[in-house]
Structure formats: C-alpha cells, structure tokens
Image (cartoon, grey):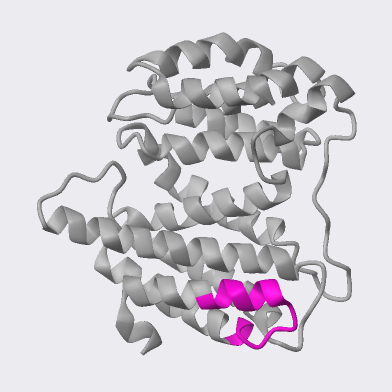
C-alpha cells in the first residue's frame, strides 16, 4: 500500500521528461511477456508510477505504438485481466499527449478497442454463458497485490478504460472520426438487447459501468469543445459536435432501458448517464 501511494505521488509530481525515464526503466522486463512473473510485476509498477503526460511530445516517439503491439502480444499469449488493466491504464494516460495519441485513433487501434469493449462487457454469445475475466492464475503471490494496489478491481478498470478510449477514438475530425463513431455504434447495437429490463445476469454490473463511463466521457468531450470555443486550452482533444450528438443518441436509449432494470446499480448508472448526456446535448434526453 505504501509503495502504491508513493508511486501515485510520483506520477503527479514528476518533472517533464520523467515519462521517458519510467518507460526505459521497466520496458526491458515487460518485454519478457505475460508468462513471466517479473514482466507482470514490471508492468504493474509501470502502471502505478507512469506520470500522465502534461504536454504534447512528452512521450518518446513510438511509445504508444509499442504499447499497443505489446498489449496485443500479451493477449495472444494467454494474457489476463490484470495485464489488460495495466496496459489500458497506460494507453488511457497516453491519450493526454496530443502528439503520441494519434496512434490510438487509427482504424486498427479503434477496431481493437471496440471489439475488446464488447468482450470485456461479458456479453453472452447465443446459448452460451457470459465469459468471465481471465485472471493471472500464474502470478506469484508476492506480486499479486500490485495488480489491485490503490485501485478498483481490474475487471472494472478494464471496462472503464476501454469506454474512455472508445469515446476518445471519436474525437478525431474527418473520415477517421466518423468511421470510429460507426464502430462505437456497432458496439451499442451489439449490447442494446442486454440493457432491456428483462435481461439480467453476471454481465449486468459491467454493462452499468460501461454506460456510465461512456456517457461521462461524452459529456467531458462536449465540455472541452465549449471551453476551447471560449478561448481556454484543453489538455485533451474536444469531441466534435457531430460525434457528441451521435454518441449521445446511441447511449440515451440504453440508459432509458436501464432505468427499469432489476439491478439497483444499473438504475443508478442510467440516471447518471442521462444526467451526463443532458450536459452533452440536452435535446437528446429532453
């Protein structure tokens, strides 16, 4: 616990350029892959200590591309929800670096983020039961505390970070941004039946988190757009009006359905989502 608090303090107090030092310090061990205890420990420590970039160009060139490739390699080699949470925390922080974050909005990255969002939601496929998170069963006990240090459960963190990144992919203006909105629409269409009050299962709490987080990100993106229009500087790119309206229209029906869910957490998430969507564009929930 004390190490986690120390790492968290370092993340916010780090001087410019510290990000590069943190990347270099841990990446050799991380490259060992998901089957190595040392690699998982290094990845978790990197997630705890890595500072959020405060200015464009703070990350070394190619860092985000390397992290995306490593995340995919770990997943293909029997990864775990603990590793996914660590990689997604790093990628979510990297989106604050406007120069490096362009790699997160490419078609390939956006497609992977959206497909992982559906998988992380635990939606059942046909008659099969909803798949559960893959935990790192091989992790040494002395490293296991690192995965949850100063943090919420990894499965919930994965969904929150994926929802943030899915909305972030829609901030790019032009054809790529429109294509990413279409990918988000496919996610909403896939999950829409599970928000109906008649559906209830192990996936319900995860769907509530996804809905609330995506609506919050949509509202924050709209607020950044208004702030930039008023002459203020935003550390993250604003959400274009067309993307804001499209995402809000996709999420509002899900929130209305969840209002009548049997799960209290789903009802609370739906109320919060409608409140945030009204801040993004009041016409959507009027």
Please tell me in which quadrant of the rendered image residue 14 appears: top left
Quadrant occupied by the C terminus:
bottom left
**Residue 50, position in %: x, y?**
51, 24
**Residue 52, position in %: x, y?**
42, 31
44 vs 64, left or right, is: right
Residue 111's place in the image compared with 47, above or below, is below
Q: Which residues are magenta?
A: 257-271
**Residue 250, position in %: x, y?**
47, 77
Please tell me in which quadrant of the rendered image residue 129 appears: bottom right
201 vs 255, left or right, is: right
Along the viewing direction, whichever of 62 and 160 lies nearer the viewer: 160
Along the viewing direction, whichever of 19 and 28 lies nearer the viewer: 19
Residue 34's place in the image compared with 118, above or below, is above
**Residue 102, position in %: x, y?**
36, 40
**Residue at horizontal 75%, vertical 62%?**
122
Quadrant occupied by the N terminus:
top right
* Residue 177 visible somewhere in the drawing: no
Q: Is residue 258 magenta?
A: yes
**Residue at horizontal 58%, vertical 53%?**
160
**Residue at horizontal 29%, vertical 63%?**
222
Q: Is residue 265 magenta?
A: yes
């Amino acid at each position: 616990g004390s190490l986690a608090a120390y790492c968290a303090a370092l993340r916010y107090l780090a001087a410019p350029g510290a990000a590069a030092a943190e990347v270099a310090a841990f990446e050799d061990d991380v490259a060992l892959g998901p089957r190595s205890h040392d690699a998982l420990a290094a990845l978790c420590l990197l997630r705890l200590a890595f500072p959020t970039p405060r200015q464009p160009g703070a990350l070394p060139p190619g860092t985000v591309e390397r992290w995306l490739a490593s995340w995919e390699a770990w997943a293909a080699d029997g990864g775990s929800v603990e590793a996914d949470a660590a990689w997604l925390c790093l990628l979510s922080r990297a989106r604050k670096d406007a120069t490096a974050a362009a790699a997160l909005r490419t078609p390939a990255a956006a497609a992977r983020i959206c497909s992982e969002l559906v998988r992380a939601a635990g939606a059942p496929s046909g008659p099969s039961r909803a798949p559960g998170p893959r935990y790192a069963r091989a992790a040494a006990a002395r490293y296991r505390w690192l995965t949850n240090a100063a943090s919420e459960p990894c499965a919930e963190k994965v969904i929150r970070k994926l929802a943030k990144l899915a909305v972030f992919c829609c901030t790019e203006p032009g054809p790529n941004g429109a294509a990413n909105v279409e990918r988000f629409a496919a996610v909403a269409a896939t999950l829409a039946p599970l928000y109906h009050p008649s559906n209830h299962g192990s996936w319900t709490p995860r769907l509530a988190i996804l809905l609330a987080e995506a609506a919050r990100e949509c509202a924050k993106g709209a607020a950044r757009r208004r702030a930039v229009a008023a002459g203020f500087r935003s550390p993250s790119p604003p959400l274009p009006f067309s993307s804001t309206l499209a995402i809000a229209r996709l999420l509002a029906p899900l929130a209305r359905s969840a209002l009548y869910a049997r799960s209290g957490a789903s009802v609370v998430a739906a109320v919060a989502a409608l409140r945030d969507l009204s801040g993004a564009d009041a016409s959507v929930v009027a």
